[in-house]
Image (cartoon, rainbow, N blue to C red):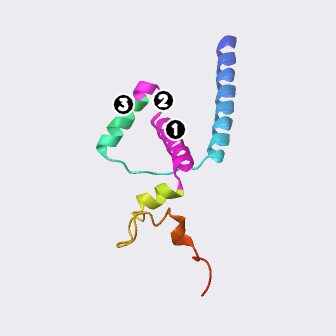
């Protein structure tokens, strides 16, 4: 009987420590809700099973990787190209943005 109560006390102590740790983690993170297609959900479940991770961990990891990658690799040129602003001036020379002779006197008032 003494061993049983000792085990119960250890489980309670572990549960309290675990609950305290969980509260700390919740306080440090934010929660979001995202709707995904059935196909994306199937892919997420497959990926989480194969990686041995929870679905939320897979999403968190993918989101962090995506945001850090895009932030570092996208230049102003990439953003303008994506927005369709590169080459959008009709009738302009093809080298308008790169040929310095077109910039002579550009910032000077008349």
Q: Secondary structure at mark 2?
A: loop
Alpha carbon distance from label 1 to label 2: 10 Å
Q: Which residue is mark 2?
A: 53
The 10 Å Cα crowd at callout 2, few under 14, some 14 to 19, many 20 or more, is few
The 10 Å Cα crowd at callout 3, few under 14, some 14 to 19, many 20 or more, is few
The numbered dot on residue 46 is 3
Q: Is residue 69 magenta?
A: yes
Residue at (63% x, 38% y) in the render: 22
Alpha carbon distance from label 1 to label 3: 15 Å
Residue at (39% x, 37% y) in the render: 44
Earlier in the chain: of badge 1 and badge 3, it is 3
Q: Which residue is mark 1?
A: 61
Earlier in the chain: of badge 3 and badge 2, it is 3
Q: Position of residue 82 (x, y in %)?
A: 42, 58
Residue at (47% x, 33% y) in the render: 54
Q: Position of residue 46 (x, y in %)?
A: 36, 31
- The mark lying in front, picked from 1 and 3, is 1
Taking depth in this image into account, of 13 and 101 the one nearest to the observer is 101
Earlier in the chain: of badge 1 and badge 2, it is 2
The numbered dot on residue 34 is none
Q: Secondary structure at mark 3?
A: helix
Mark 3 and mark 1 in contact (Cβ < 8 Å)?
no
| Relative to 55, residue 99 above or below | below
Q: Is residue 54 magenta?
A: yes
Q: Quadrant of residue 87?
A: bottom left
Main SS class of the magenta portion in the image: helix
Q: Residue furthest left?
A: 39
Q: On the picture, is 46 further left or further right than 19?
A: left
- For the record, the magenta segment spans 49-75
Mark 2 and mark 3 in contact (Cβ < 8 Å)?
no
Mark 2 and mark 1 in contact (Cβ < 8 Å)?
yes
Q: Quadrant of residue 85?
A: bottom left
């Amino acid at each position: 009987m003494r061993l049983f109560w000792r085990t119960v006390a250890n489980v309670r102590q572990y549960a309290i420590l675990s609950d305290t740790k969980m509260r700390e983690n919740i306080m440090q993170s934010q929660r979001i809700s995202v709707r995904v297609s059935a196909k994306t959900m199937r892919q997420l479940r497959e990926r989480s099973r194969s990686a041995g991770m929870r679905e939320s961990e897979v999403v968190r990891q993918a989101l962090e990787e995506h945001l850090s990658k895009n932030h570092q690799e996208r230049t102003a040129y990439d953003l303008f190209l994506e927005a369709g602003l590169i080459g959008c001036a009709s009738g302009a020379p093809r080298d308008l943005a790169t040929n310095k002779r077109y910039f002579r006197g550009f910032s000077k008032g008349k």
